[in-house]
Amino acid sequence: MTTVRNRAAGWHRPLLLLASAMAALAVVAAVGVVADPRVLTGAPVWLKPLKFAVSFVLYGVTLAWMLSLLPRRSRLAERAATVIVAVSVVEMAVIVVQVLRGTTSHFNGTTPLNAALFNVMGAAITVLFGAQVVLAVVLLRRPLPDRAGGYAVRLGLGVSLLGMLVAFPMLTQRPAGTPAGITGAHSVGVPDGGPGLPLVGWSTTGGDLRVGHFIGLHALQALPLLAILLDRFLGARLDELARARLVLVGGVAYAGVTVLATAQALRGQPLLRPDALTLTAAAVLVAATATAAGLVLARRSGHAAVVLVG
């Protein structure tokens, strides 16, 4: 698959610098998780910087790779990527500063300073969202060498924007028992900091909007990986158009999973305790995805049979 085999020489350097800096921060945060006994909202105080740093490593490398796929340089896309780097640094700086101060960074309006820092984070993420929209538009308008890879990149950017939007309902959550001055929550129906899944901390007693947020954001990696796997294992049997259609099916299904996980959370339902409605919706999504993929493969098989007979 030509799309994923470009040389790294054309990769966006500021994004790679961001990824390198976040990798170093991840190491520091990992040490902090072990060495610092402090706990915030039921988790080690350095766990949030660790998770965000790892996420930004993946984000920076993925966007740099996507920009390297363009057949020619786009100054608009490169400037948008540089803006993403700048606001990502601001976001992480606030998170680390608040950890050093021993308080939370998100939804924290308990003091004027805490509220101001949270507002800075909100502004940074809004700018980042707009800059990624610019990248998505540029990559949508420019032809890429491989159709399946192109679908994967564009759908990955689009679904990850959907994942970012999932964060906005967090601002409206006020579960009973939320401390005064806290202006939002990840959880629905229960306060943040209660029982949660290992490492990710997603609530096991109520809904958690971080599930859909996480799923959507990582479409950036998941959908290109799907295109790579299709090329690696089915490239000899499926032509470019068939692989592109399968990526399209996968992208729509992935967006569906993001929406389903978000709807489940908004209903105050833990991820691992789905009710009949959630299970039914999931079954419909699986059936629709399987049917669509089957139609793509059947059409390809029918075409191959016609070619052989002819």
Image (spheres, rainbow, N blue to C red):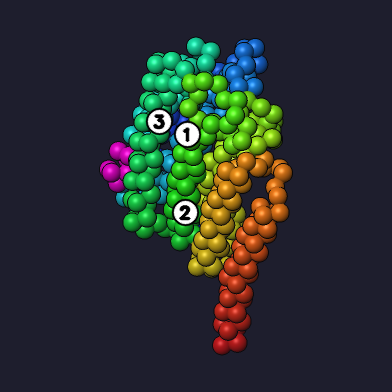
Marks 1 and 2, how far apart in space? 26 Å
Above-or-below relation of 304 to 247? below
Residue shown at 68% from the left, 31% from the top = 196
Q: Quadrant of the C terminus?
A: bottom right
Which residue occupies 43% across, 18% down? 114
Disc sitting over residue 171 in the figure: 1
Q: Are marks 2 and 3 in contact (CB under 8 Å)?
A: no
Where residue 44 appears, x then y in whole percent? 63, 19
Is residue 8 something that shows in the picture? no
Residue receiving disc 2: 155
**Amino acid type, label 2:** Leu
Quarter of the rendering containing residue 35:
top right
Give percent across and percent down for residue 309. 60, 87
Q: Main secondary structure of the magenta part?
A: helix
The answer to which of 245 and 51 lies nearer the viewer is 51
| Residue drawn at (55%, 62%) of the image | 249
Helix, strand or loop for disc 3: helix
| Relative to 194, residue 131 above or below | below
Within 10 Å of disc 3 (Cα), the crowding (few <14, some 14-19, many 20+) is some
* Amino acid type, residue under disc 3 in the picture: Gly
